[in-house]
């Protein structure tokens, strides 16, 4: 199963609630889950890299500056072709710049383009992505979920997901990523649907959107 559209997401939610009926009341309260799919490739990964910041407003501002120069779907070639003085105006941290450069070079030089990489099994794709300098597990997981439609990924290190899972199962205490990963095993093979559900639940709890761009 690959999540390609709203119907796939709805089917996945049906499977999830069959696997864990405890989540039915949360699903009812949250309503339709956001699909939030973007085409695979450099632009999708670049947006996720930028979005991994403490301040969503800062991330959005940086992305607006980048797309103002590069267009709404930046390409690896165009990004690498920018003069350093233009890149400096975006406000990227050194770490984000390193990750974007590594992603752009991988997309241009291979051995696999970023869009082709999403068609690999999740474990192999994760290993390839996290081998890129500056790209960590969260970035790779979110890219595979929202640009590749992978159905069975749960980013257990995501703070919002930890808070949301803690609110449901741990009396408001925030569990460790390892504990969250253990809980999420019950939601295979549709853990990506469960992640969307718990991000939506977090938004309901806090009034803040934590779902990656």
Image (cartoon, grey):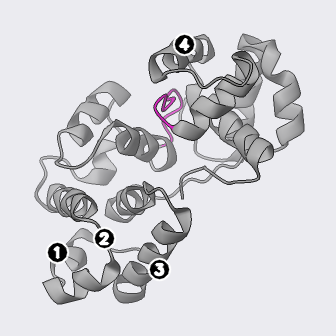
Lower position in the chain sequence, tag 1 or tag 3: 3
The mark that comes first in sequence, 4 or 2, is 2
In the rendered structure, which segment of residues is drawn in magenta? 149-158
Which residue is labeled 2 in the image?
92
Badge 4: how crowded within 10 Å, few (<14), some, or many (20+)?
some
Going from N to C along the chain, the mark reached first, 1 or 2, is: 1
The quadrant where residue 90 appears: bottom left
Question: For residue 185, which numbered disc appears in the image?
Answer: 4
Q: Is residue 193 visible to us here?
A: no
Q: CA distance from mark 4 to mark 3?
A: 37 Å
Magenta-span inclusion, residue 87: no
**Where is residue 168 drawn, in percent x and y?**
75, 23
- Return the mark for residue 80: 1
Decide if residue 120 is in sight here: yes
Give how far apart the Cα atoms at labels 3 and 2 are.
Answer: 12 Å
**Image position, residue 172 (x, y; %):** 71, 25
């Amino acid at each position: 199963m690959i999540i390609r559209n709203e119907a796939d997401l709805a089917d996945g939610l049906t499977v999830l609630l069959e696997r864990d009926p405890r989540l039915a009341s949360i699903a009812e309260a949250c309503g339709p889950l956001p699909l939030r799919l973007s085409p695979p490739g450099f632009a999708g990964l670049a947006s996720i890299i930028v979005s991994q910041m403490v301040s969503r407003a800062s991330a959005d501002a940086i992305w607006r500056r980048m797309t103002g120069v590069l267009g709404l779907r930046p390409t690896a070639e165009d990004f690498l072709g920018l003069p350093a003085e233009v890149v400096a105006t975006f406000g990227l941290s050194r770490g984000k710049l390193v990750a974007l450069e590594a992603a752009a070079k991988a997309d241009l030089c291979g051995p696999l383009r970023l869009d082709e990489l999403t068609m690999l099994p999740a474990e192999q794709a994760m290993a390839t992505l996290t081998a890129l300098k500056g790209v960590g597990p969260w970035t790779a997981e979110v890219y595979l979920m929202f640009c590749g439609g992978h159905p069975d990924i749960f980013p257990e290190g995501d703070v919002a997901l930890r808070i949301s899972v803690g609110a449901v199962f741990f009396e408001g205490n925030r569990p460790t990523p390892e504990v969250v990963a253990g809980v999420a095993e019950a939601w295979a093979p549709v853990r990506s649907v469960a992640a969307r559900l718990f991000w939506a639940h977090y938004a309901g709890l806090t009034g803040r959107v934590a779902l990656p761009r």
